[in-house]
Image (cartoon, rainbow, N blue to C red):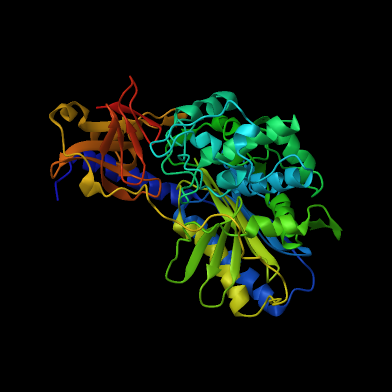
Protein backbone atom coordinates (compact mmCIF):
# COMPACT_ATOMS: atom_id res chain seq x y z
CA UNK A 1 0.00 0.00 0.00
CA UNK A 2 1.53 3.38 -1.02
CA UNK A 3 2.28 5.82 1.77
CA UNK A 4 0.60 9.21 1.89
CA UNK A 5 2.80 12.31 1.98
CA UNK A 6 3.49 13.51 5.51
CA UNK A 7 1.58 16.76 4.90
CA UNK A 8 -1.46 14.81 3.79
CA UNK A 9 -1.33 12.65 6.90
CA UNK A 10 -1.18 15.74 9.12
CA UNK A 11 -4.12 17.45 7.40
CA UNK A 12 -6.19 14.28 7.36
CA UNK A 13 -5.54 13.84 11.07
CA UNK A 14 -6.66 17.41 11.73
CA UNK A 15 -9.85 16.87 9.74
CA UNK A 16 -10.63 13.68 11.63
CA UNK A 17 -9.96 15.45 14.92
CA UNK A 18 -12.26 18.33 13.99
CA UNK A 19 -14.92 15.85 12.92
CA UNK A 20 -14.66 14.10 16.28
CA UNK A 21 -14.94 17.44 18.08
CA UNK A 22 -18.05 18.19 15.99
CA UNK A 23 -19.63 14.91 17.08
CA UNK A 24 -18.92 15.69 20.74
CA UNK A 25 -20.48 19.14 20.25
CA UNK A 26 -23.80 17.58 19.21
CA UNK A 27 -26.48 18.35 21.79
CA UNK A 28 -29.25 15.77 21.26
CA UNK A 29 -31.64 17.14 23.88
CA UNK A 30 -35.34 16.46 23.54
CA UNK A 31 -37.08 19.56 22.15
CA UNK A 32 -40.71 18.51 21.87
CA UNK A 33 -42.71 15.30 22.08
CA UNK A 34 -46.19 13.91 21.54
CA UNK A 35 -47.33 10.58 22.97
CA UNK A 36 -50.81 9.22 22.28
CA UNK A 37 -52.86 8.42 25.37
CA UNK A 38 -53.56 4.79 26.13
CA UNK A 39 -50.53 3.21 24.47
CA UNK A 40 -49.69 -0.33 25.56
CA UNK A 41 -46.83 -1.04 27.96
CA UNK A 42 -44.93 -2.56 25.04
CA UNK A 43 -45.23 0.61 22.98
CA UNK A 44 -44.20 2.74 25.95
CA UNK A 45 -41.10 0.55 26.28
CA UNK A 46 -40.31 1.10 22.59
CA UNK A 47 -40.55 4.86 23.14
CA UNK A 48 -38.39 4.76 26.24
CA UNK A 49 -35.70 2.71 24.52
CA UNK A 50 -35.89 4.91 21.43
CA UNK A 51 -35.12 8.04 23.45
CA UNK A 52 -31.75 6.65 24.46
CA UNK A 53 -31.04 4.98 21.10
CA UNK A 54 -31.74 8.11 19.04
CA UNK A 55 -29.76 10.42 21.28
CA UNK A 56 -26.84 7.99 21.30
CA UNK A 57 -27.03 7.72 17.52
CA UNK A 58 -26.95 11.50 17.11
CA UNK A 59 -23.87 11.71 19.32
CA UNK A 60 -22.02 8.78 17.74
CA UNK A 61 -22.71 9.66 14.10
CA UNK A 62 -22.73 13.43 14.46
CA UNK A 63 -26.32 14.46 13.69
CA UNK A 64 -27.04 17.92 15.15
CA UNK A 65 -30.81 17.64 14.86
CA UNK A 66 -33.67 15.40 13.75
CA UNK A 67 -37.38 14.75 14.10
CA UNK A 68 -39.21 11.43 13.94
CA UNK A 69 -42.61 9.84 14.24
CA UNK A 70 -44.34 6.48 14.45
CA UNK A 71 -47.81 6.53 12.92
CA UNK A 72 -50.79 4.23 12.35
CA UNK A 73 -54.10 4.62 10.51
CA UNK A 74 -55.49 6.81 13.31
CA UNK A 75 -52.57 9.23 13.37
CA UNK A 76 -49.34 9.73 15.30
CA UNK A 77 -48.43 7.20 17.98
CA UNK A 78 -45.27 9.02 19.06
CA UNK A 79 -43.35 11.94 17.64
CA UNK A 80 -40.35 13.87 18.90
CA UNK A 81 -37.72 16.41 17.92
CA UNK A 82 -34.11 16.33 19.12
CA UNK A 83 -31.17 18.72 18.90
CA UNK A 84 -31.03 21.87 16.81
CA UNK A 85 -32.17 22.94 13.36
CA UNK A 86 -29.63 25.78 13.61
CA UNK A 87 -27.34 25.60 16.64
CA UNK A 88 -25.74 28.99 15.92
CA UNK A 89 -29.13 30.75 16.08
CA UNK A 90 -30.41 28.48 18.87
CA UNK A 91 -33.27 27.18 16.71
CA UNK A 92 -34.46 23.81 18.10
CA UNK A 93 -35.27 20.90 15.81
CA UNK A 94 -38.90 20.09 16.59
CA UNK A 95 -41.66 18.07 14.96
CA UNK A 96 -42.71 21.34 13.27
CA UNK A 97 -39.25 22.11 11.85
CA UNK A 98 -39.30 22.27 8.06
CA UNK A 99 -36.71 20.00 6.44
CA UNK A 100 -36.06 18.50 3.03
CA UNK A 101 -37.94 15.38 1.98
CA UNK A 102 -35.16 14.88 -0.59
CA UNK A 103 -35.88 11.76 -2.67
CA UNK A 104 -39.00 10.96 -0.66
CA UNK A 105 -40.40 13.68 -2.94
CA UNK A 106 -40.69 10.90 -5.54
CA UNK A 107 -43.51 9.37 -3.49
CA UNK A 108 -45.31 12.72 -3.56
CA UNK A 109 -44.75 12.87 -7.33
CA UNK A 110 -46.12 9.36 -7.84
CA UNK A 111 -49.14 10.24 -5.70
CA UNK A 112 -49.71 13.47 -7.66
CA UNK A 113 -49.73 11.46 -10.90
CA UNK A 114 -52.41 9.20 -9.44
CA UNK A 115 -54.56 12.28 -8.78
CA UNK A 116 -53.98 13.45 -12.36
CA UNK A 117 -55.01 10.01 -13.64
CA UNK A 118 -58.11 10.15 -11.45
CA UNK A 119 -58.95 13.52 -13.03
CA UNK A 120 -58.48 12.11 -16.54
CA UNK A 121 -55.44 14.30 -17.28
CA UNK A 122 -52.84 11.55 -17.73
CA UNK A 123 -52.48 7.91 -18.72
CA UNK A 124 -49.63 5.66 -17.65
CA UNK A 125 -48.94 3.91 -20.94
CA UNK A 126 -49.25 6.74 -23.44
CA UNK A 127 -45.88 7.83 -24.95
CA UNK A 128 -44.93 11.05 -23.19
CA UNK A 129 -44.31 12.86 -26.49
CA UNK A 130 -48.10 13.17 -26.67
CA UNK A 131 -47.79 15.43 -23.63
CA UNK A 132 -44.40 17.05 -24.41
CA UNK A 133 -43.86 16.84 -28.20
CA UNK A 134 -40.46 18.59 -28.08
CA UNK A 135 -38.90 15.91 -25.85
CA UNK A 136 -35.99 13.85 -27.23
CA UNK A 137 -33.04 11.85 -25.92
CA UNK A 138 -29.98 10.03 -27.33
CA UNK A 139 -29.69 6.24 -27.49
CA UNK A 140 -27.14 3.70 -28.72
CA UNK A 141 -29.72 0.92 -28.71
CA UNK A 142 -32.77 1.99 -30.67
CA UNK A 143 -34.12 4.70 -32.93
CA UNK A 144 -36.55 7.28 -31.61
CA UNK A 145 -36.54 6.09 -27.98
CA UNK A 146 -38.51 9.19 -27.00
CA UNK A 147 -41.48 7.71 -28.85
CA UNK A 148 -41.46 4.67 -26.53
CA UNK A 149 -41.00 6.22 -23.08
CA UNK A 150 -44.20 6.38 -20.99
CA UNK A 151 -45.09 7.74 -17.56
CA UNK A 152 -44.96 4.17 -16.26
CA UNK A 153 -41.33 3.93 -17.39
CA UNK A 154 -40.48 7.24 -15.70
CA UNK A 155 -42.20 6.37 -12.41
CA UNK A 156 -40.56 2.92 -12.24
CA UNK A 157 -37.09 4.18 -13.25
CA UNK A 158 -37.09 1.93 -16.31
CA UNK A 159 -36.92 4.56 -19.07
CA UNK A 160 -33.15 4.27 -19.42
CA UNK A 161 -32.63 7.93 -18.55
CA UNK A 162 -29.44 8.51 -16.53
CA UNK A 163 -29.49 9.71 -12.95
CA UNK A 164 -28.58 13.37 -13.50
CA UNK A 165 -28.11 16.07 -16.14
CA UNK A 166 -25.00 18.20 -16.58
CA UNK A 167 -26.74 21.35 -15.29
CA UNK A 168 -28.38 19.82 -12.19
CA UNK A 169 -26.72 17.11 -10.11
CA UNK A 170 -25.31 16.33 -6.68
CA UNK A 171 -21.98 18.04 -7.37
CA UNK A 172 -23.44 21.09 -9.12
CA UNK A 173 -25.72 23.20 -6.92
CA UNK A 174 -25.25 26.36 -9.00
CA UNK A 175 -28.96 27.02 -9.31
CA UNK A 176 -29.89 26.22 -12.90
CA UNK A 177 -33.53 26.84 -13.75
CA UNK A 178 -36.02 24.01 -14.09
CA UNK A 179 -36.47 24.91 -17.75
CA UNK A 180 -32.71 24.63 -18.39
CA UNK A 181 -32.69 21.31 -16.56
CA UNK A 182 -35.54 19.82 -18.60
CA UNK A 183 -34.07 21.10 -21.87
CA UNK A 184 -30.69 19.51 -21.07
CA UNK A 185 -32.26 16.03 -20.84
CA UNK A 186 -32.20 15.95 -24.65
CA UNK A 187 -28.38 16.05 -24.48
CA UNK A 188 -28.16 12.91 -22.33
CA UNK A 189 -27.69 9.30 -23.42
CA UNK A 190 -29.86 6.40 -22.28
CA UNK A 191 -28.06 3.81 -20.15
CA UNK A 192 -30.14 0.94 -21.60
CA UNK A 193 -33.10 0.22 -23.85
CA UNK A 194 -36.43 1.68 -22.86
CA UNK A 195 -38.22 -0.65 -20.43
CA UNK A 196 -35.34 -3.12 -20.21
CA UNK A 197 -34.33 -2.78 -16.58
CA UNK A 198 -34.49 -0.51 -13.54
CA UNK A 199 -31.87 2.24 -13.26
CA UNK A 200 -32.51 4.98 -10.73
CA UNK A 201 -33.08 8.36 -12.36
CA UNK A 202 -33.75 11.77 -10.84
CA UNK A 203 -34.16 13.07 -14.38
CA UNK A 204 -37.16 10.82 -14.98
CA UNK A 205 -39.04 12.10 -11.94
CA UNK A 206 -38.29 15.72 -12.84
CA UNK A 207 -39.66 15.01 -16.30
CA UNK A 208 -42.83 13.70 -14.64
CA UNK A 209 -43.15 17.01 -12.77
CA UNK A 210 -42.73 18.86 -16.08
CA UNK A 211 -45.49 16.77 -17.68
CA UNK A 212 -47.78 17.49 -14.72
CA UNK A 213 -47.19 21.20 -15.20
CA UNK A 214 -47.91 21.01 -18.93
CA UNK A 215 -51.11 19.00 -18.48
CA UNK A 216 -52.53 20.89 -15.48
CA UNK A 217 -51.43 24.40 -16.44
CA UNK A 218 -50.15 24.83 -12.89
CA UNK A 219 -46.73 24.72 -11.31
CA UNK A 220 -45.70 21.44 -9.68
CA UNK A 221 -45.84 23.19 -6.31
CA UNK A 222 -49.38 24.50 -6.94
CA UNK A 223 -50.72 21.16 -8.16
CA UNK A 224 -49.15 19.28 -5.25
CA UNK A 225 -50.57 21.83 -2.83
CA UNK A 226 -54.10 21.56 -4.20
CA UNK A 227 -54.24 17.78 -4.62
CA UNK A 228 -52.15 16.54 -1.69
CA UNK A 229 -51.12 19.11 0.91
CA UNK A 230 -54.45 20.92 1.38
CA UNK A 231 -56.76 17.84 1.51
CA UNK A 232 -54.36 16.17 3.97
CA UNK A 233 -54.01 19.30 6.16
CA UNK A 234 -50.28 19.41 5.41
CA UNK A 235 -50.27 23.20 5.67
CA UNK A 236 -46.55 23.55 6.47
CA UNK A 237 -45.41 21.51 3.46
CA UNK A 238 -44.44 22.96 0.09
CA UNK A 239 -42.49 22.26 -3.08
CA UNK A 240 -41.64 25.95 -3.40
CA UNK A 241 -38.05 26.61 -2.23
CA UNK A 242 -38.95 30.23 -1.44
CA UNK A 243 -41.22 28.96 1.36
CA UNK A 244 -38.32 27.04 2.87
CA UNK A 245 -35.94 29.99 2.66
CA UNK A 246 -38.40 32.29 4.40
CA UNK A 247 -38.99 30.04 7.39
CA UNK A 248 -37.00 30.66 10.54
CA UNK A 249 -37.86 27.21 11.87
CA UNK A 250 -36.08 25.29 9.11
CA UNK A 251 -33.27 22.75 9.18
CA UNK A 252 -29.90 24.09 8.07
CA UNK A 253 -28.00 21.53 5.94
CA UNK A 254 -25.14 19.97 7.91
CA UNK A 255 -21.89 18.84 6.32
CA UNK A 256 -18.76 19.28 8.49
CA UNK A 257 -16.43 21.97 7.11
CA UNK A 258 -18.74 22.56 4.13
CA UNK A 259 -21.36 25.27 3.61
CA UNK A 260 -24.15 24.09 1.32
CA UNK A 261 -26.50 26.03 -0.93
CA UNK A 262 -30.00 24.69 -1.52
CA UNK A 263 -30.71 26.72 -4.64
CA UNK A 264 -30.70 23.56 -6.79
CA UNK A 265 -33.96 22.23 -5.34
CA UNK A 266 -35.86 24.58 -7.63
CA UNK A 267 -34.68 22.42 -10.54
CA UNK A 268 -35.05 19.12 -8.67
CA UNK A 269 -38.85 19.32 -8.72
CA UNK A 270 -40.30 15.85 -9.10
CA UNK A 271 -37.16 14.21 -7.69
CA UNK A 272 -36.47 16.23 -4.55
CA UNK A 273 -38.16 19.61 -4.10
CA UNK A 274 -40.60 18.96 -1.23
CA UNK A 275 -40.03 20.47 2.20
CA UNK A 276 -42.07 19.13 5.08
CA UNK A 277 -41.99 18.39 8.80
CA UNK A 278 -42.63 15.34 10.95
CA UNK A 279 -46.27 16.20 11.68
CA UNK A 280 -47.14 16.73 8.03
CA UNK A 281 -45.22 13.71 6.75
CA UNK A 282 -47.01 11.58 9.34
CA UNK A 283 -50.34 12.71 7.83
CA UNK A 284 -49.13 11.70 4.37
CA UNK A 285 -48.17 8.21 5.59
CA UNK A 286 -51.52 7.95 7.40
CA UNK A 287 -53.24 8.81 4.10
CA UNK A 288 -51.47 5.93 2.37
CA UNK A 289 -52.19 3.56 5.25
CA UNK A 290 -55.87 4.43 4.87
CA UNK A 291 -55.74 3.60 1.19
CA UNK A 292 -56.34 7.14 -0.05
CA UNK A 293 -58.88 8.23 2.56
CA UNK A 294 -58.79 11.23 4.90
CA UNK A 295 -61.15 11.33 7.88
CA UNK A 296 -63.10 8.40 6.47
CA UNK A 297 -63.66 10.15 3.14
CA UNK A 298 -62.02 8.81 -0.03
CA UNK A 299 -59.75 11.42 -1.62
CA UNK A 300 -57.88 9.12 -4.00
CA UNK A 301 -59.35 5.90 -5.41
CA UNK A 302 -57.84 2.99 -3.49
CA UNK A 303 -57.27 1.17 -6.79
CA UNK A 304 -54.77 3.90 -7.67
CA UNK A 305 -52.95 3.36 -4.36
CA UNK A 306 -52.77 -0.35 -5.24
CA UNK A 307 -51.43 0.63 -8.64
CA UNK A 308 -48.61 2.62 -7.03
CA UNK A 309 -47.60 -0.42 -4.97
CA UNK A 310 -47.72 -2.86 -7.86
CA UNK A 311 -44.10 -3.87 -8.45
CA UNK A 312 -42.45 -3.62 -11.82
CA UNK A 313 -41.47 -7.04 -13.24
CA UNK A 314 -38.00 -5.64 -13.92
CA UNK A 315 -34.92 -6.10 -11.77
CA UNK A 316 -36.38 -7.28 -8.44
CA UNK A 317 -33.01 -6.90 -6.67
CA UNK A 318 -33.17 -10.04 -4.50
CA UNK A 319 -31.17 -9.93 -1.27
CA UNK A 320 -30.52 -12.72 1.26
CA UNK A 321 -33.47 -11.72 3.46
CA UNK A 322 -35.68 -9.59 1.23
CA UNK A 323 -36.37 -8.45 -2.29
CA UNK A 324 -36.68 -4.85 -3.40
CA UNK A 325 -39.13 -4.01 -6.16
CA UNK A 326 -39.83 -0.70 -7.81
CA UNK A 327 -43.40 0.53 -7.71
CA UNK A 328 -44.74 3.78 -9.16
CA UNK A 329 -42.66 6.32 -7.25
CA UNK A 330 -42.17 3.98 -4.27
CA UNK A 331 -39.96 1.08 -3.32
CA UNK A 332 -41.67 -2.13 -2.21
CA UNK A 333 -39.53 -4.32 0.06
CA UNK A 334 -40.73 -7.86 0.74
CA UNK A 335 -39.32 -9.90 3.62
CA UNK A 336 -38.74 -13.36 2.18
CA UNK A 337 -39.25 -15.15 5.49
CA UNK A 338 -42.72 -13.87 6.36
CA UNK A 339 -43.88 -12.00 3.26
CA UNK A 340 -44.27 -8.63 5.00
CA UNK A 341 -44.33 -5.65 2.65
CA UNK A 342 -42.60 -2.38 3.50
CA UNK A 343 -43.43 0.55 1.21
CA UNK A 344 -41.82 3.98 1.00
CA UNK A 345 -38.57 5.73 0.16
CA UNK A 346 -35.35 7.10 1.61
CA UNK A 347 -34.07 10.53 0.71
CA UNK A 348 -30.54 11.91 0.73
CA UNK A 349 -29.22 15.33 -0.20
CA UNK A 350 -26.34 17.63 0.66
CA UNK A 351 -26.55 17.90 4.44
CA UNK A 352 -30.17 16.71 4.88
CA UNK A 353 -31.75 13.25 4.78
CA UNK A 354 -35.20 11.71 5.12
CA UNK A 355 -36.92 8.36 5.57
CA UNK A 356 -40.56 7.40 5.27
CA UNK A 357 -41.69 3.76 5.36
CA UNK A 358 -44.87 1.90 6.21
CA UNK A 359 -46.25 -1.66 6.43
CA UNK A 360 -49.70 -1.58 4.75
CA UNK A 361 -50.95 -4.90 6.12
CA UNK A 362 -49.99 -3.90 9.68
CA UNK A 363 -51.31 -0.38 9.26
CA UNK A 364 -48.34 1.48 10.71
CA UNK A 365 -45.11 3.18 9.65
CA UNK A 366 -42.50 5.71 10.62
CA UNK A 367 -40.36 8.59 9.47
CA UNK A 368 -37.16 10.49 10.18
CA UNK A 369 -36.04 13.94 8.99
CA UNK A 370 -32.42 14.69 9.84
CA UNK A 371 -29.49 17.02 9.42
CA UNK A 372 -26.86 14.58 8.23
CA UNK A 373 -23.35 14.89 6.87
CA UNK A 374 -23.33 11.56 5.05
CA UNK A 375 -25.20 10.78 1.83
CA UNK A 376 -25.90 7.15 2.74
CA UNK A 377 -25.46 6.84 6.49
CA UNK A 378 -26.35 3.25 7.39
CA UNK A 379 -26.31 3.86 11.13
CA UNK A 380 -28.79 6.68 10.73
CA UNK A 381 -31.26 4.39 8.98
CA UNK A 382 -30.98 1.65 11.58
CA UNK A 383 -33.21 3.15 14.27
CA UNK A 384 -36.40 3.34 12.20
CA UNK A 385 -35.97 -0.05 10.54
CA UNK A 386 -35.04 -1.81 13.78
CA UNK A 387 -37.90 -0.18 15.70
CA UNK A 388 -40.56 -1.15 13.15
CA UNK A 389 -39.26 -4.72 13.00
CA UNK A 390 -39.36 -4.85 16.80
CA UNK A 391 -42.98 -3.69 16.85
CA UNK A 392 -43.90 -6.51 14.47
CA UNK A 393 -41.83 -9.16 16.26
CA UNK A 394 -43.29 -8.26 19.67
CA UNK A 395 -46.82 -8.20 18.21
CA UNK A 396 -47.36 -4.58 19.18
CA UNK A 397 -49.18 -4.17 15.87
CA UNK A 398 -51.67 -6.64 14.45
CA UNK A 399 -51.45 -7.99 10.93
CA UNK A 400 -54.63 -7.91 8.90
CA UNK A 401 -54.35 -10.92 6.60
CA UNK A 402 -57.51 -9.86 4.78
CA UNK A 403 -56.05 -6.48 3.90
CA UNK A 404 -55.41 -6.41 0.14
CA UNK A 405 -51.96 -4.87 0.25
CA UNK A 406 -50.92 -5.17 -3.37
CA UNK A 407 -52.42 -6.88 -6.35
CA UNK A 408 -48.96 -8.21 -7.23
CA UNK A 409 -50.02 -8.38 -10.86
CA UNK A 410 -48.88 -6.44 -13.86
CA UNK A 411 -49.83 -6.55 -17.51
CA UNK A 412 -46.77 -4.87 -18.95
CA UNK A 413 -43.30 -6.20 -19.65
CA UNK A 414 -41.98 -9.73 -19.60
CA UNK A 415 -39.03 -9.36 -17.25
CA UNK A 416 -35.43 -8.26 -17.69
CA UNK A 417 -33.39 -9.27 -20.71
CA UNK A 418 -30.24 -7.16 -20.15
CA UNK A 419 -29.41 -7.29 -23.87
CA UNK A 420 -27.56 -3.99 -23.60
CA UNK A 421 -25.19 -5.18 -20.88
CA UNK A 422 -22.25 -5.78 -23.17
CA UNK A 423 -19.41 -8.14 -22.33
CA UNK A 424 -16.45 -5.86 -21.50
CA UNK A 425 -14.10 -8.48 -22.96
CA UNK A 426 -15.65 -7.71 -26.37
CA UNK A 427 -14.77 -4.00 -26.10
CA UNK A 428 -12.32 -2.42 -28.53
CA UNK A 429 -8.74 -2.78 -27.24
CA UNK A 430 -6.85 0.35 -26.24
CA UNK A 431 -6.09 2.62 -29.19
CA UNK A 432 -2.91 4.79 -29.31
CA UNK A 433 -4.89 8.01 -29.82
CA UNK A 434 -6.79 7.34 -26.58
CA UNK A 435 -3.66 8.23 -24.64
CA UNK A 436 -4.80 11.87 -24.65
CA UNK A 437 -7.86 10.87 -22.63
CA UNK A 438 -5.97 9.19 -19.77
CA UNK A 439 -5.35 10.99 -16.51
CA UNK A 440 -7.10 12.10 -13.33
CA UNK A 441 -10.22 14.24 -13.47
CA UNK A 442 -11.71 16.17 -10.56
CA UNK A 443 -15.41 16.87 -10.14
CA UNK A 444 -16.28 20.54 -10.59
CA UNK A 445 -18.10 21.51 -7.41
CA UNK A 446 -20.63 24.35 -7.52
CA UNK A 447 -22.80 25.55 -4.67
CA UNK A 448 -20.45 24.21 -1.98
CA UNK A 449 -18.21 26.47 0.09
CA UNK A 450 -15.36 24.33 1.43
CA UNK A 451 -13.40 25.23 4.53
CA UNK A 452 -9.71 26.05 4.13
CA UNK A 453 -8.67 22.68 5.55
CA UNK A 454 -10.90 20.76 3.16
CA UNK A 455 -9.58 22.75 0.18
CA UNK A 456 -5.98 22.09 1.19
CA UNK A 457 -6.57 18.39 1.83
CA UNK A 458 -8.38 17.97 -1.48
CA UNK A 459 -5.63 19.79 -3.37
CA UNK A 460 -2.93 17.62 -1.81
CA UNK A 461 -4.38 14.15 -2.17
CA UNK A 462 -8.05 14.39 -3.09
CA UNK A 463 -10.84 12.24 -1.71
CA UNK A 464 -11.96 9.18 -3.70
CA UNK A 465 -15.50 10.44 -4.41
CA UNK A 466 -14.14 13.71 -5.82
CA UNK A 467 -12.11 12.34 -8.70
CA UNK A 468 -12.26 9.98 -11.66
CA UNK A 469 -9.25 8.23 -13.18
CA UNK A 470 -9.05 7.15 -16.81
CA UNK A 471 -6.17 4.80 -17.63
CA UNK A 472 -5.00 1.90 -19.72
CA UNK A 473 -5.35 -1.44 -17.92
CA UNK A 474 -4.73 -4.89 -19.42
CA UNK A 475 -4.89 -3.49 -22.93
CA UNK A 476 -8.22 -1.66 -22.49
CA UNK A 477 -9.32 1.84 -21.49
CA UNK A 478 -10.63 1.81 -17.92
CA UNK A 479 -12.40 4.25 -15.62
CA UNK A 480 -11.84 4.15 -11.85
CA UNK A 481 -14.43 6.01 -9.82
CA UNK A 482 -16.55 6.00 -6.67
CA UNK A 483 -20.32 5.89 -6.93
CA UNK A 484 -22.55 7.91 -4.59
CA UNK A 485 -22.54 5.03 -2.09
CA UNK A 486 -18.75 5.51 -1.80
CA UNK A 487 -18.05 2.18 -3.51
CA UNK A 488 -14.88 2.19 -5.62
CA UNK A 489 -15.37 0.71 -9.08
CA UNK A 490 -13.11 -0.31 -11.98
CA UNK A 491 -14.94 -0.53 -15.33
CA UNK A 492 -13.80 -0.90 -18.92
CA UNK A 493 -14.78 1.69 -21.49
CA UNK A 494 -15.74 1.28 -25.13
CA UNK A 495 -15.91 4.10 -27.66
CA UNK A 496 -19.24 4.83 -29.35
CA UNK A 497 -18.21 8.07 -31.06
CA UNK A 498 -14.79 9.78 -31.00
CA UNK A 499 -14.35 10.87 -27.39
CA UNK A 500 -17.65 9.34 -26.24
CA UNK A 501 -17.25 6.18 -24.13
CA UNK A 502 -19.59 3.83 -22.25
CA UNK A 503 -19.17 1.08 -19.67
CA UNK A 504 -20.98 -2.25 -19.95
CA UNK A 505 -23.76 -0.84 -17.73
CA UNK A 506 -24.24 2.29 -19.83
CA UNK A 507 -22.34 4.81 -17.69
CA UNK A 508 -21.10 7.58 -19.95
CA UNK A 509 -17.71 9.31 -20.18
CA UNK A 510 -17.94 12.23 -22.60
CA UNK A 511 -14.62 13.86 -23.49
CA UNK A 512 -15.76 15.60 -26.66
CA UNK A 513 -16.35 19.12 -25.38
CA UNK A 514 -14.42 21.77 -23.50
CA UNK A 515 -15.84 20.45 -20.22
CA UNK A 516 -15.56 16.65 -19.90
CA UNK A 517 -18.31 14.78 -18.05
CA UNK A 518 -18.70 11.45 -16.28
CA UNK A 519 -22.32 10.35 -15.89
CA UNK A 520 -23.15 14.00 -16.62
CA UNK A 521 -21.04 15.25 -13.69
CA UNK A 522 -18.73 17.99 -14.94
CA UNK A 523 -14.99 17.31 -14.66
CA UNK A 524 -11.71 19.18 -14.78
CA UNK A 525 -8.53 17.37 -15.77
CA UNK A 526 -5.66 17.70 -13.31
Any part of residue 459 in sight = no
- Vertical comparison of 190 with 283: above or below: above
Q: Residue at x 31, y 46 (%)?
A: 504
Furthest-top residue in this view:
514
In the displayed structure, would residue 270 be above or below residue 510?
A: below
Q: With respect to residue 314, does 462 lie above or below?
A: above
x, y percentage for residue 511? 30, 27
The picture places residue 119, in percent across and down from the top left corner, at: 79, 43
Identify the image quadrant of residue 364. bottom right
State the residue in front, 506 or 418. Answer: 418
The quarter of the image holding the C terminus is: top left
- The number of callouts visible is 0
| Residue 100 relative to residue 164: left or right | right
Identify which residue is drawn at 13% across, 42% down.
475
Near-viewer residue (287 or 312): 312
Which is nearer the eye, 180 or 412?
412
The residue closer to the viewer here, 236 or 442, is: 442
Q: Residue 78: percent from the left, percent from the top?
A: 70, 63
Amino acid sequence: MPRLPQASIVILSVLLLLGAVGCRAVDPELQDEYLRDGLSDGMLTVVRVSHQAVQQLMTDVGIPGLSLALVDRDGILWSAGFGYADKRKKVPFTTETLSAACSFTKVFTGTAVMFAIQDGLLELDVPIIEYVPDFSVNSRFEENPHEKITLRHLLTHSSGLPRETTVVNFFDLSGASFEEHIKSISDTWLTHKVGERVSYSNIGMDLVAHILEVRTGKSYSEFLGETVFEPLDMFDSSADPAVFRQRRNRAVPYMPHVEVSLEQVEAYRGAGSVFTNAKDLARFIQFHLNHGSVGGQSVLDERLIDLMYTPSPLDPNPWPNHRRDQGLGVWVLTTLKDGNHKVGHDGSGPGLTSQGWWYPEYGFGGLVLARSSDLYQKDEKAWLDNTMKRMIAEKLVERNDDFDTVSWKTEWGSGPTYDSWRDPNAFTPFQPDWKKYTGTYRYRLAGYKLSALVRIATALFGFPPLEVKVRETDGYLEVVHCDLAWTKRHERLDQHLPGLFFTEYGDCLDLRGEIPTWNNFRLKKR
